[in-house]
Amino acid sequence: MIIHKDLANGRWFELSLVEQLANIGSEVERTILWKQKGNTQWSQKAFERALELIDLTVSSPKNKGRLKEILRVREMLVDHFVFDNKYSSSDESWQKYFFSFNYAAALQRGL
């Protein structure tokens, strides 16, 4: 099931990689916040949206040179939120990682 239909229809591919990662980070942030509030259903939905955005990012031809990093981020997110966290990441480390993309995207927009 496609959640972000308007993005999947081409709008996602118009965004820069920094903007794409900033949007992914927003969904990861929602995942963390809902998890901390104890709402596993909403946390899961936010995580599914994050994975969908990562998959859209991977499918973009302009990101070919960054596939290794993008796919590693996906692997580590799934490990952290779904499996045994063998990479020992934390909610805080993910928030810090994605903050830089949100900051850079804001700078690109002139904010």
Image: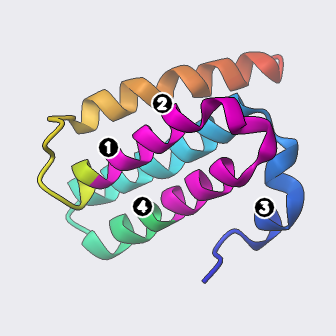
Q: The residue tagged with tag 3: helix, strand or loop?
A: helix
Measured in 3D between alpha carbons, the distance from the residue under mark 2 to the one under mark 1, in whole angstroms, is 13 Å
Tags 1 and 3 in contact by the CB under 8 Å rule?
A: no
The residue carrying pointer 3 sits among few (fewer than 14), some (14 to 19) or many (20 or more) residues within 10 Å by Cα, namely some
Q: Which amino acid does label 4 sit on?
A: Phe
Using the image, tell me which numbered label, if any, was put on residue 86.
Answer: none
Q: What residue type is labelled 1?
A: Met
Residue 111 is at least partly visible in this image: no
Relative to 80, residue 94 above or below: above
The residue drawn where x is 43% and y is 71% is 45
Residue 3 is at least partly visible in this image: yes
Instruction: Check if residue 73 falls in the magenta segment.
Output: yes
Q: What residue type is labelled 2?
A: Phe
Quadrant holding the N terminus: bottom right
Give coordinates of residue 60: x percent, y percent: 76, 48
Q: The residue tagged with tag 2: helix, strand or loop?
A: helix
Q: The residue tagged with tag 1: helix, strand or loop?
A: helix
Over which residues does the magenta segment extend?
49-78
> Of marks 1 and 3, which one's residue comes earlier in the chain?
3
Q: Which amino acid does label 3 sit on?
A: Leu
Tags 3 and 2 in contact by the CB under 8 Å rule?
A: no
Main SS of the magenta part reads helix
Using the image, tell me which numbered label, if any, was put on residue 98.
Answer: 2
> Of marks 2 and 1, which one's residue comes earlier in the chain?
1
Q: Name the residue under label 1.
A: 76
Measured in 3D between alpha carbons, the distance from the residue under mark 3 to the one under mark 4, in whole angstroms, is 17 Å
> Of marks 1 and 4, which one's residue comes earlier in the chain?
4
Using the image, tell me which numbered label, if any, was put on residue 7.
Answer: 3
- Viewer-proximal residue among 5 and 67: 67
Q: Name the residue under label 4.
A: 47
The residue drawn where x is 48% and y is 30% is 98
